[in-house]
Image (cartoon, rainbow, N blue to C red):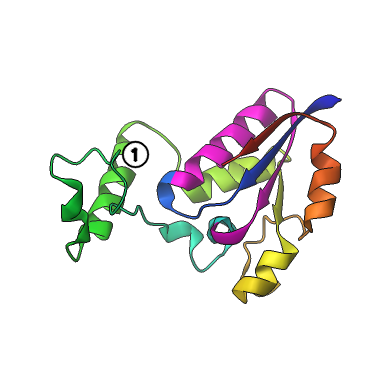
Amino acid sequence: MVDRVAIIASKGTLDMAYPPLIMASTAAAMDMECAIFFTFYGLDIVNKKKYANLKVAPVGNPAMPMPVPNIIGMIPGMTAMASKMMKDMMKKSGVPTIPELITACDEMGVKLWPCEMTLGVMGIDADDLIPEVDRTCGAATFLEYAIEAKISLFI
């Protein structure tokens, strides 16, 4: 095994875009080889129409740091409010934005691999992907990469 990290990003909300990108950029900073396989809604993280404006879903998210009951998340406008709140928290803490993390990952050599099958299922064209994407790949290609990884994460 080599010093390699294999990450699967399966969710495309703002709060779920941070973990794979932070883990990957940290691994790369530690001189580890790293790839992120974006599948299903995780494709939103590398979709140029969505990645810069990902949202936080307050409904069904009991961990939301909102001083109101979770059911309030159903009120129109709460998704926008929760998303803005999280972006403000991240900015205040000095955490890079999703586009900044993607740029950092790209500059450090992290492989950004969207799932070919999921692109077809979701009707997403390769032209819809951000330019930092290395290439699309299938599950077998990612697993061949992951089999040599010391760390594999499903996020």
Quarter of the picture containing the C terminus is top right
The residue beneath circle 1 is: 91
Residue ID at (19%, 66%): 76
**Residue 59 falls in image quadrant:** bottom left
Against 60, is 25 above or below?
Answer: above
Per the picture, the main secondary structure of the magenta-coloured stretch is helix
* Between 39 and 103, the one nearer to me in the picture: 39
Horizontal side, residue 26 vs residue 92: left or right: right
89 sits left or right of 78 in the view: right
Left or right position of 87 against 104: left
- Give coordinates of residue 89: x percent, y percent: 29, 38
Q: Position of residue 1 (x, y in %)?
A: 86, 25
Query: Is residue 118 rendered magenta in the image?
Result: no
Residue at x 51%, y 38% (from the top left corner)? 19
Closer to the camera in the image, 140 or 44: 140
Where residue 123 sits: x, y (%)?
Answer: 62, 77
The vertical placement of 116 against 3, above or below, is below
Report whether 18 appears left or right of 84: right
Is residue 30 one of those drawn in magenta?
A: yes
Find the residue positioned furthest to the left: 68
Residue at image coords 31%, 44%: 86
Image location (x, y in percent) of residue 85 = 25, 46
Considering the numbered disc 1 on the image, is that residue within a helix, a strand or a loop?
Answer: helix
Range of residues picked out in magenta: 16-41
Under mark 1, the amino acid is Lys
Q: Residue at 59% across / 60% down in the picture?
A: 40
Numbered label tally: 1
Say few, some or many: other residues with alpha carbon within 10 Å of mark 1 (under 14 / 14 to 19 / 20 or more): few
